[in-house]
Image (cartoon, rainbow, N blue to C red):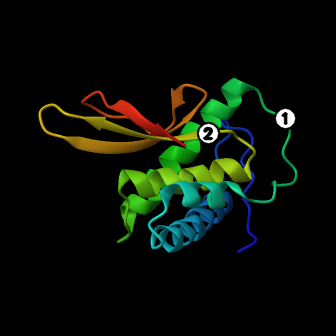
Amino acid sequence: MGLTVVVDRPEARLSLRRKLALAVEILSAYARVRGLLRRGDVPGAVESLRTVPPSEGMRPRTVREDELLGRQLGRAVVRVLGLLPTDSRCLVCSLVLTRLLARRGIPSALVIGVASEPAFTAHAWVETGDVPLLSPHEPDYAPLLRL
């Protein structure tokens, strides 16, 4: 799908039309993520999701603006996927967000972390710089893999 919603002012409220376009972009990215995950190759999926043509019409942003925009997009991904009967686990949300960030030229890292207390668990989130865009949640997860 060739639709790209350019949200380059994170402080701006989105119109209903832009919210709907962003929801469509999220669902399109979700479909791509599901197809890539069927292969079982997460590093390959991340590489593929980052290989997108740059969006047109964006103005240059500061690092802080990238962080704010990344958080806004992260909230939108969680909200949209959480409302639908889709797979909204942390890895899927993180991969969808990775795609949206790449389309906007925002560098990011997919982080997979583990915690051993009180029981062994794993969690995935996205960071730009060292700022988590999707929360690493409690308990404290030790980063195991950064893609």
Classify residue 124 by image quadrant. top left
For the point 38% across and 60% down, which residue is it? Answer: 88
* Residue 82 percent coordinates (x, y): 37, 59
Which residue extends farthest left?
A: 118
Does residue 102 appear to the left or right of 137 in the view shown?
right
Q: Which of these two is toward me, 52 or 58? A: 52
Q: Which of these two is toward me, 94 or 69? A: 94
Disc number placed over residue 60 in the picture, else none: 1
Does residue 5 appear to the left or right of 71 in the view shown?
right
For the point 70% across and 40% down, which residue is it? Answer: 106
Numbered disc 2: secondary structure = loop
Does residue 145 appear to the left or right of 43 in the view shown?
left
Marks 1 and 2, Cα distance to the nearest angstrom? 17 Å
| Residue position marked by numbered label 2 in the rendering | 108
Of callouts 1 and 2, the N-terminal one: 1
Mark 2 Cα shell of 10 Å, populated few (<14), some (14-19), many (≥20)? many
Q: Amino acid at mark 2?
A: Ser
Q: Amino acid at mark 1?
A: Pro
Dots 1 and 2: beta carbons under 8 Å? Answer: no
| Visible residue check, residue 30 | yes
